[in-house]
Amino acid sequence: MELKRVFVADDSLLQRKLGKGRLTELTAKEDSQLEGQLAKLPQDLINEIGKRLINYADYIRLQSTCKSLKSMLPKMPNHQFSQVPWLMLPHDNVSENTRFSFLNPLENKMYNLDIPEVKGMLLRGSSYGWILAVDGYPKLCLINPFTRAQIQLPPLDTFPDVLSFDPNMPNKEYLIYKERSYLRSQKTHTRGVAYFRKVFVNKVVLSSNPVSNDYTAIAIYGEFEELAFCRSGDKKWSKLNIPGYGDDIMSHEGKFYVLNISKGVWIGDATSLPKMTRIAPPQHTPDACWLVRMTSGELAFVNIRFECKPLVDPKGREYYKTTHFVVYKLDQRRLKWNEVTSIGDDAFFIGKNNSLSVSSQNLPNGWRKNCIYFSDAYTEGHIDGIVGGYDNVMYNLETRRIESIPGYVHYVVSDSLLVSPAPIWVIPNPSI
């Protein structure tokens, strides 16, 4: 489906471009007449029209109405970054096909984009509309799926504790320093490209849109879920010392938030790293968690609860089924985490992406509020024989029930999942 193909409705010229009705294309003469009319509109009015379009597909349609509007409207207005992300669906990364499907939840429609730049690479998350792509050799880069632009990050062999990379050592390409005071193990060991490709980088979050060329990235990496950071222009990753390993990271307005294993929260400005300050106490909770900044400004974290089930196949694997989520909100006055049963008008989008909270007050009538949209991020379980990456659900906190994400087709649990990246929430971002 072509995003930029514009259809219009039969009526007046403007209604035929933007209104509802029987869809038809304008003639060249009508298009010229409409462009002349629109070119006379004040810039402030054009900007206001753009800000009222909360659906990225609608914004593209408005831009494509005529050359005048395309030049007057920014490629991506700032308000779009707080809007509903699209779900980038799983894709067999070993095939020749480089066409990806994106689900737009506002329309319950699929859009297909060809992204040949990701061929042979594994996708490991998103931030500010850019996806992280890993090939294990040891390239690490950001790719904009809407423009196909690329930005190189420091490679995998520059992470702390990675001593060397030798492509001539099959299945032992990487030498890692592994000694820890609480472990009784050898000081170094080897790992292959497959491990670095699938597991080594757990998540990467950016401080801002990387097109600014003034950004910072934080990564959760390695067997011990440690933290490292780099700034634009850096040649290597630097260690970020936070007590306990990183459970989740997120950024908002140039500040990073780190949720460690004990569920304490640390905050640091992108310009002052590695210095970070603890702002929330521990809350010992099992299983994986995601840190979210609500639209009210409050901090919360989401705890997933699931059960493992046997998968009948020759490999004797297991798969898990999400049963529910538990949400904890920070009482900033008492510095205490409280379990809550509602997130009000907000909807959370969590997974390998920089976690997002969107208010339903800015969305069309009927949009689901008080819900958690979860894209399965447990691909690391494949190493332990647990099938992950397929259990993508919406959890309704009001009914306390797991539901299907509207418009999403569940994928069958199969071997193909072991070579497919997990679905990823991506903010549409055409900035270059």
Image: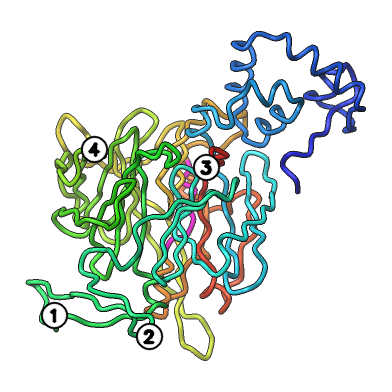
Disc 1 to disc 2, C-alpha distance:
22 Å
Judging by the rendered image, the residue that carries numbered circle 3 is 427
Disc 4 to disc 3, C-alpha distance:
24 Å
Three-letter amino acid code at the position of disc 2: Asn
Which mark sits nearer the N-terminus, 3 or 2?
2
Does the stretch in magenta take in 47? no
The answer to whether mark 1 and mark 3 are in CB contact below 8 A is no
Q: Nearer the viewer, residue 221 or 384?
A: 221
Disc 3 to disc 2, C-alpha distance:
39 Å
Judging by the rendered image, the residue that carries numbered circle 2 is 168
Assign a secondary structure to mark 3.
loop
Which mark sits nearer the N-terminus, 1 or 2?
2
Three-letter amino acid code at the position of disc 1: Lys
Q: Looking at the image, which residue is at 59% across and 46% down?
A: 147
Three-letter amino acid code at the position of disc 3: Ile
In this picture, residue 211 sits left or right of residue 364: left
Judging by the rendered image, the residue that carries numbered circle 4 is 271
Which mark sits nearer the N-terminus, 2 or 4?
2
Q: Is residue 184 above or below residue 56?
A: below
Q: Is residue 219 above or below residue 308?
A: above
Which mark sits nearer the N-terminus, 4 or 3?
4
Q: Residues within 10 Å of mark 3 (few under 14, many from 20)?
A: many
Assign a secondary structure to mark 4.
loop
Assign a secondary structure to mark 2.
loop
Disc 4 to disc 1, C-alpha distance:
33 Å
Q: Which mark is residue 187?
A: 1
**Range drawn in magenta:** 371-377
Q: Looking at the image, which residue is at 54% across and 27% down?
A: 77
The answer to whether mark 4 and mark 3 are in CB contact below 8 A is no
Q: Is residue 188 above or below residue 358?
A: below
The answer to whether mark 3 and mark 2 are in CB contact below 8 A is no
